[in-house]
């Protein structure tokens, strides 16, 4: 089992940048594929980005390609989401998630562990 805690959300203006951080408990962090999802009010939770155990492979939603970057530091049990050129439509609660699968996947059903989320609000 792994416990996840997100941080780094906030209120920013369109065009600004934010870096989200997800810190995991436990000594098996490097065994999990990690991902970020977001959920806006009234919408379903949607995939944003994922990274494999070693960090060697990533996957992004089309809406964030070229603007967001996911990375991880297994020595620090941490995964990051660097968000650049933020848009008002990026406004949502952002969740960190962990999967026992060894490859990047986008479906919420593949992720067994979730954090509580951090709010990101982008004003126009």
Image (spheres, grey):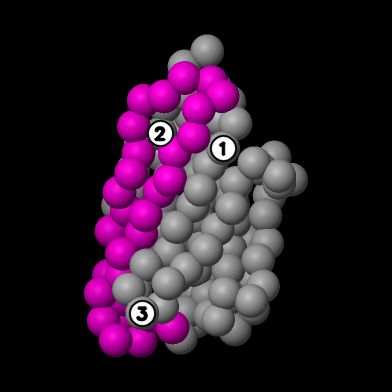
- Residue that carries the numbered disc 3 in the rendered image: 75
Task: Give the residue at x 37% y 54%.
Answer: 21
SS of the residue under disc 3 = helix
SS of the residue under disc 1 = loop
SS of the residue under disc 2 = strand
Measuring from the top left, give residue 88's x and y in whole percent. Answer: 54, 22
- Residue that carries the numbered disc 2 in the rendered image: 120
Residue 113 within the segment the image draws in magenta: no
Residue 7 within the segment the image draws in magenta: yes
Measuring from the top left, give residue 40's x and y in whole percent. Answer: 48, 33
Task: Give the residue at x 57% y 74%.
Answer: 55
Q: CA distance from mark 2 to mark 1?
A: 13 Å
Q: Is residue 102 above or below residue 72?
A: below
Task: Give the residue at x 60% y 46%.
Answer: 68
Which span is picked out in magenta? 1-30
- Residue that carries the numbered disc 1 in the rendered image: 84
The numbered mark, 2 or 3, whose residue comes first in the sequence reads 3
Task: Give the residue at x 67% y 54%.
Answer: 60
Image quarter (top left, top right, bottom left or bottom right) of the N terminus:
bottom left
Measuring from the top left, give residue 95's x and y in whole percent. Answer: 41, 51
Which is closer to the viewer, label 2 or label 3? 3
* Foreground residue among 116 and 109: 116
């Amino acid at each position: 089992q792994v416990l996840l805690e997100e941080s780094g959300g906030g209120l920013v203006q369109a065009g600004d940048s934010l870096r989200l951080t997800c810190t995991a408990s436990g000594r098996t962090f490097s065994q999990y594929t990690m991902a970020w999802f977001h959920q806006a009010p009234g919408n379903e939770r949607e995939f944003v980005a994922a990274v494999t155990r070693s960090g060697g492979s990533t996957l992004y939603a089309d809406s964030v390609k070229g603007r967001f970057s996911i990375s991880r530091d297994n020595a620090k049990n941490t995964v990051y989401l660097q968000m650049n050129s933020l848009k008002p439509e990026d406004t949502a609660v952002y969740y960190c998630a962990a999967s026992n699968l060894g490859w990047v996947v986008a479906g919420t059903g593949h992720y067994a562990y979730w954090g509580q989320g951090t709010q990101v609000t982008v004003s126009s």
